[in-house]
Structure formats: C-alpha cells, structure tokens
Image (tube, rainbow, N blue to C red):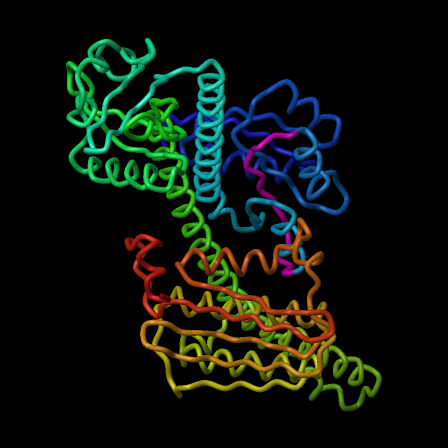
Amino acid sequence: MLNKELRVLLVECSDQDAETVLTKLSDTGYMLKYTRVSDEEGMQRALTRNTFDVILCSDEGNCFGGLPALSLLRRLGLDIPFLLLARELKEETILRTLQAGVDDYILKGSLNRLVPSIEHNLHQARIRQEYRDTQSALQESQARMHAFIADLPGMAYQIHLDADGNTRFPYVSEGCHPLLGIEAQELTATPGLLDEMLHPEDAAGYRSSMLHSAEHLTFWNWEGRLHTHPTGEIKWINLRCSPRHAEEGVLWEGIMLNITQSKMDAADLASSKQQLHELSAHIEDVREQERIAIAREVHDELGSLLTATKLDIAWLCSHLKDEPKLASKAKDIESLIDKCTRGASNISRSLRPSALDTFGIIAAIDNEMQEFAQRTGITCDFAHSEETLELAPRIAISLFRILQEALANITKHAQSTQVNISLVHNGPVVELIISDNGCGIRDADRAKPRSFGLRGIFERVAHFGGEAKLHSAPGQGTTLSVQLPCRYDQTIPPELQHALFD
C-alpha cells in the first residue's frame, strides 16, 4: 500500500471530521490527492473537472451529502466507489443507503474499516471496468463479423456429394487462401483435401452432419476445427449452406467463415463471467461478515451499556421512594431502556441469527417462524423431514436469508393469513418450500425493474448451482420452492453442480 496514489473526493462540511479522515488515509501510506467540497455545486464542479478513485461522503442531516450526493453521481453517469461516513449506526439508514447503491457504510467514530473498504471497492470497480471493456470488445467483434458477412467474406463454395459418398468442390471463391492457406484451384482439383485438413476430433461430426443434410435436404450448419496449410495452424470455421438435388448426388452452395476470433471472444466472456461469479460470492461473504461484526457490536457493546444503564436506573428508583414524581419518571426511563434492549436484540438477531450458528438451520427457521407469527399475527406451520440437518455454512445462511426475504415479501404484499414452510432433505439436496394463501403475484409485478427481492433470491440460488421455482396466480397464493446442494464446493463448475438435480 505504500506510495500508492489515491485520488479522493471528500464531501464533508465538518473541518474536524475531514481532518480525521484524511489523517487516517495518510497514516496508511497513501500518496493522497484529495479535493474537499461541502455543497452540490462544488461536488458537481469537482467531478466534471477531475478524476477520482473514490468518494467519501458525510451523511449528516444538516449538511449536503448522503443520498442526494449519490443521486448527483448517478446523474453524471460516473462509476466511482461511493462510501458513506456516518456518525450513528442505524439499521434503517444502512439498509436504505445500501439498497440505493451506496458501496459501504462507515462509522466516523470507528474508521478501522475505512482503508479495507476502499481497497475492496476499488477492486470491484476494476472488475466492473474490465467487464465493460470485455463487453465492448465483444460488441466490436460482433460488428466486424456482421460487416464481414455483408461483404461476402470468407470462402464462397459449392460442395458436391456423389452416390458413392465422395465429395468435391466444383467452385471455390478467392477467399480460400486467406481462410485455408491454399489456393482455390488446389481445393477444386484435389477431392477430399478438406477432409484431410479437418481436426481429428471434429471430422466425424462434419461427416455426420453432411449426410444428415443430404438425406433430408435440410440446411447444413456446422462448426469445427481444421489445420490450415502450410503451417498447420488450427482455425475454427463455420460452414453454412443449402442443399439441392444435382446430377448424381447432392450439391450444396454456401459460405465458410473463420470464427476463430469469436470463439476466443466467447472464451474471454466466459472468463469474465467467472470473475463476476467469484466477485459475487466474495461480496456475499463480505456482507455476511459485516452483518456478523455489526451484530456482535450491537449485542456486546450496546447491550452491555443498556444493561448497566438499567442497573443504575434501578438503583436510582430505590433511592427515590420519597419522591413519587421522580420515581415515576425513573420508571418511565427504565421502560424505555427495556424497549431499547429488545430493539437491540432484534437488530442483532436479524443481522445474524444466533440459533443458526448454535443449533442449526431447523432451529433457526423455527425461531424465525415463531417471531414472524408473533409480529404479524399470520398463522405459520413448519414441517421438516429430520430433527437435525447438517449443511455447509454458506448453504445454511443462504437458505435462512432466502426465508427472511420471502417472509418480508409476504408481510409487504401477500395479504395472507397462513404461511406453510417445509424443509426436506433428499440425498445431496435440501429443498425449502414457502407457500402462502395470499393475493398472489401478477406477471407484471415480477417483471418490475426494481423487483430486487425475488431477483436476489433467484440469483443467490443460481450462485450455488441450485434451482428455484415460483408458482403464483392472482387470488391463489404463492409457492416458492428452492433446491440447494447440502454441500458446496466453489471449485465445482456450475454445470456439474446442476447434475445434482437431474
């Protein structure tokens, strides 16, 4: 990290807070270049005149910053990591800002996470830029390919297949040499030359597709590799042609294209998708670790402070027996402290259910179901095939988060009176089924651009190579079925993980 340049836009109206943040960054060894602004006009001017690696933005009610600053960044169409610096920890604010697109939420009073968060989000920004570059390169490649086809690039040809199964090229265009490395006359004069150039692993497929097209007179579309002359370079080609009956056999007329570059681009795109897949997994891990850390701070620090405060209030009440009004006020304060304690406990449990780590997924679901029923008044039933179920930790927490999201959707939209939950263990697969008797989900609702809840569930399931199904109709309730592997090995390709569900 030493001698690493960092260009920072600091949106902060407090001189003291600005000095604290800049000192923290400087102490880590950054070669810091920063611009500080305190209003919308200054931020817009800075973003249009300069380039920044990261934006650190204060979230104070009496100053410009927070979500209005994020909105300005979005209007300018810039992709710069955006970190909020806040003085208080409020779950509602955290959730709202993260949902709005803020990259992270840092407490001003505890900046230990500031530098790791900056490094993490800079890495994410680089991955996104690489993905955009790859997409742009792929689009450019496709545009070149379309222009290539429009101008009849590659090799135009005729292939004749006689009754004995022999092939020859009655006609070959001048594009033969750039494509195959041989002159057109050589290919027309030497029957079977193209067969000799085919890659051994693709020759059988080439012959089989030809015979099928000849028998049924269907369009012949084949992709494969061949060794070009004289270097033996391997090229991917795409052969596309239409057959018709001809004298003593079948005649095809079409074009042969070099698709080597598109194959390479597809491989590059697949690599980029894998990187995004790994990034998504990393983000989920980081979020879960942050939830654990915040839950621990709320439970240990805030809980301890509230307990100590309650003891002090109890002592005070015991010494105010002769002061009824003061004693009554002290009792009111004690009641408020009890509410704060329950609120802190609920926040801690929501961020990271202790039952999940201590007793497993079944106990965690059972607790969540009971709390949901008590909180909403909706009748709940939980059925499970086993009393205990061992799952990989990432699978267990994912199932629990899916359950939380589904119950949140039911609370907001379903208008139901009954929820049924079942957890079924079937060999290498665990299935979670959540159904309600509510108003159902319309197709238009599922297609809404900002329908992040359901989309997040399906993407979380796809990440593990699982399967999710949603059945719903207006007025007939909704059933969500999720299947995940009990064990998860991130090194197993998704296509092999899907074999679990065949």
Identity of the residue drawn at 70% across and 36% down: 13
Residue 78 placement, left or right of 487: right
Residue 70 placement, left or right of 112: right
Q: Is residue 119 magenta?
A: no
Please identify the quarter of the rendering in which residue 410 is found.
bottom right
Specify start and end residues of the magenta stretch as a single range. 77-91
> Residue 200: horizontal and vertical position, in percent?
15, 35
Outermost residue on the right side: it is: 325
Decide if residue 47 is in sight here. yes
- Front-most of 244 and 138? 244
Identity of the residue drawn at 44% across and 31% down: 130
- Front-most of 394 and 27? 394
> Residue 157: horizontal and vertical position, in percent?
34, 18
Identity of the residue drawn at 58% across and 74% down: 345
> Residue 16: horizontal and vertical position, in percent?
63, 38
* Position of 321 relative to 204 (above/below): below
* Position of 251 relative to 292 (above/below): above
Q: Is residue 83 magenta?
A: yes
Decide whether the magenta segment is chiefly helix, strand or loop.
loop
Please identify the quarter of the rendering in which residue 161 is found.
top left
* Position of 205 relative to 460 (above/below): above
> Residue 45: horizontal and vertical position, in percent?
70, 22
- Front-most of 357 and 197? 197
